[in-house]
Image (cartoon, grey):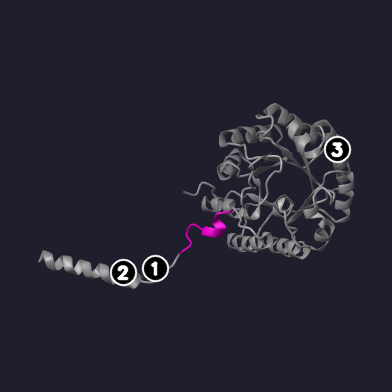
Amino acid sequence: MNTGNGTRLFINEVATRDGFQMESRFIPTEDKIALIDRMSGLGYAKIEVTSFTSAKAIPALRDGEEVMGRIARRPGVVYTALVPNLRGGERALDSRVEEFNVVMSASETHNLANLRMTRAQSFAQLAEVIALARQARVPVNVSLSCVFGCPMEGEVPLEGVLGWIERFAERGVAGITLCDTTGMAYPTQVQDICASALARFASLDFTAHFHNTRAMGLVNTMAAVEAGVRRLDMSLGGIGGCPYAPGATGNVATEDVVHMLQCMGYDTGMDLDGLVAAAATLEALVQHALPAQVSRAGHRLTRHAPPADFAEIVERAKARDAGTKELQT
């Protein structure tokens, strides 16, 4: 049953930032550029290309300027980057980033552990980044971490989450990403939080971002879509994770989510076969198995050849039928 009825959903790719920053092996610059150029033709709404954090903090993305400057930009795709501070914002503007993605946690403890600042300090720093972007007429999206729970604090109060969204909305941001940073979300919670945010802040573009830590990434994605979210983060091959969540696994895999949504009748605009092929390239780059499933199993209607001796099996079955008929006569 096609429940999507052609509803348009917009897919954002985060593997080249959220995924690559977690890899122990440095992915060569040329390979990053080639992969992004390939992904640009697969139907994405946005591709998060890199991060303008210091090279010391995230050495895996130390080539951010070069990658951003050399990719072949395709009309209709928005090329974003993570921007942590004013210096990062200046570098991003010089590199013609088309949208700033700034990050803060809804959890005080997680924000201190991850960013080494209180939430108030993070907000003050990001307010400067937002002002810089607005002056340059570059839209800003806020990725709000730990919306669905914190591995150190537990539940994160909804009113607190909505309060931070309101403060960012007052600064003029274009969108908010509701992040299940450590894979703690569950479907009914996702529906409640997403519905509350959409109802209160109708002017903002909301994106949902899930990790598959507890194997609920796909159902949480569907819960967000059913609540009205139309923009979704995902990661090719399912790479990524969170360094402050023991046992955390990667993001929901792009090919797995797109496969599910297309089966259900949603219009993602994505080339699923192209995603599977790109995932094979990605696996060769990172040099380890990817957690995604569809890139291994194929589409649900993928046909497989019968056994090599299938013709003999058929003949033996026919012979048994013939023998049975002789006995009956």
The quarter in which the C terminus is drawn is bottom left
Relative to 271, does residue 151 appear above or below in the rendering? above
**Residue 63: x %, y % from top left:** 82, 58
Q: Which mark is residue 313?
A: 2
Q: Are marks 2 and 1 in contact (CB under 8 Å)?
A: yes
The magenta span reads: 292-303
Using the image, tell me which numbered label, if any, was put on residue 307.
1
Residue 215: name its quadrant. top right
Residues at marks 1 and 3, CA–CA distance in whole angstroms = 63 Å
- Where disc 3 sits, the SS reads helix
Q: Is residue 135 visible?
A: no
Count of numbered circles in the view:
3
Query: Is residue 86 covered in magenta?
Result: no
**Which residue sits at x=88%, y=39%?**
128
Q: Nearer the viewer, residue 90 or 251?
A: 251
Which residue is denoted by mark 3 in the rendering? 127
Q: Amino acid at mark 3?
A: Ala
Residue that lies at the very extreme toward the left in this rendered image:
329
Q: Amino acid at mark 2?
A: Ile
Give the percent coordinates (x, y) of residue 239. Answer: 65, 52
Residue 206 at x, y percent in the picture: 69, 41
Q: Earlier in the sequence, mark 1 or mark 3?
A: 3
Vertical order, 157 against 235 (above or below):
above
Tell me the chief SS of the magenta region.
loop
Residue 304, above or below 57: below
- Element at label 1: loop
Which residue type does callout 1 highlight?
Answer: Pro
Q: Nearer the viewer, mark 1 or mark 3?
A: 1
Q: Earlier in the sequence, mark 3 or mark 2?
A: 3
State whether residue 67 is above or below residue 120.
Answer: below
